[in-house]
Image (tube, rainbow, N blue to C red):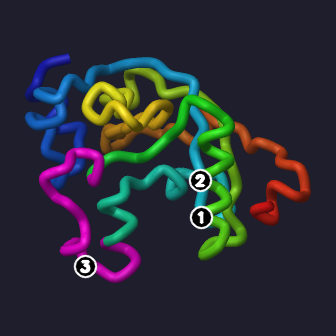
Amino acid sequence: MTNEHIQKCFPAYIPEEEIRKAGAKENEYNVYRICKWGELNQHAFISTYEEVLERDGNVNDLDLNDISSFSTSCFEKEKDAKRMMKFFTKKNPQAILAYGNIKKETGLSQKTSERKPKQKSHVDWWIYKDSIIYSDFKKVTLERSEENGE
């Protein structure tokens, strides 16, 4: 895939050159994704940047020098995803957990620990503009206590 093709594939706001310099590649990972709005659909995979734009349009609270701000967050380890679910269900009680695959052809991805060693199982995923990815994921059934954030 050429750089020209990649630029056409990414949404305009993604700093593709910076992401590549940081070491992101077309990787494949099995990951968990928290779907904050309770549905497993394309919208459940928007980036942090897009989410903030939708919520209030104020990206001033984001660190725009941190390439993670432009990614979709995932986790390799179920326990880490469940821990974050507890945090998200306080504001989004309808949130669900999904498990699936990041495929090479869907975008660039990187284990965040390559840049931030304390982020052990977090994965940043910069999804190509027209990639349909939700069909590569399935809802994870949580026990009742986990659904309630206990």
According to the image, label 3 marks what residue? 58
70 with respect to 40 (left or right): left
The reply to whether callout 1 and callout 2 are in contact (CB within 8 Å) is yes
Crowdedness of circle 2 by 10 Å Cα count: few (<14), some, many (20+)? Answer: some
Point out the tag, 2 or 3, that comes first from the N-terminus: 3
Residue at mark 1: 88
The three-letter code of the residue at mark 2 reads Met
- Residue drawn at x 38%, y 19% is 27
Part of the protein shown in magenta: 53-69
Three-letter code, disc 1: Phe
* x and y percentages locating residue 52 in the rendered image: 34, 70
Callout 1–callout 3 Cβ contact below 8 Å: no
Tell me if I can see residue 78 in this picture. Answer: yes
Image x and y of residue 133, in percent = 51, 38
Query: Hey, which quadrant is residue 114 in on the image?
Result: top left
Q: Position of residue 86 (x, y in %)?
A: 67, 60
Tell me how far mark 1 sits from mark 3, CA to CA: 20 Å
| On-image quarter of the N terminus | top left
Could you tell me which secondary element the residue under label 1 belongs to?
helix
* Location of residue 145 (image quadrant): bottom right
Look at mark 2 in the image and give the residue it sits on.
84
Q: Is residue 88 magenta?
A: no
The amino acid marked with disc number 3 is: Asn
CA gap between label 1 and label 2 equals: 6 Å
Residue 135 on image: x %, y %: 62, 37
Kindly identify the residue that appears in the image at 61 percent across and 31 percent down: 77
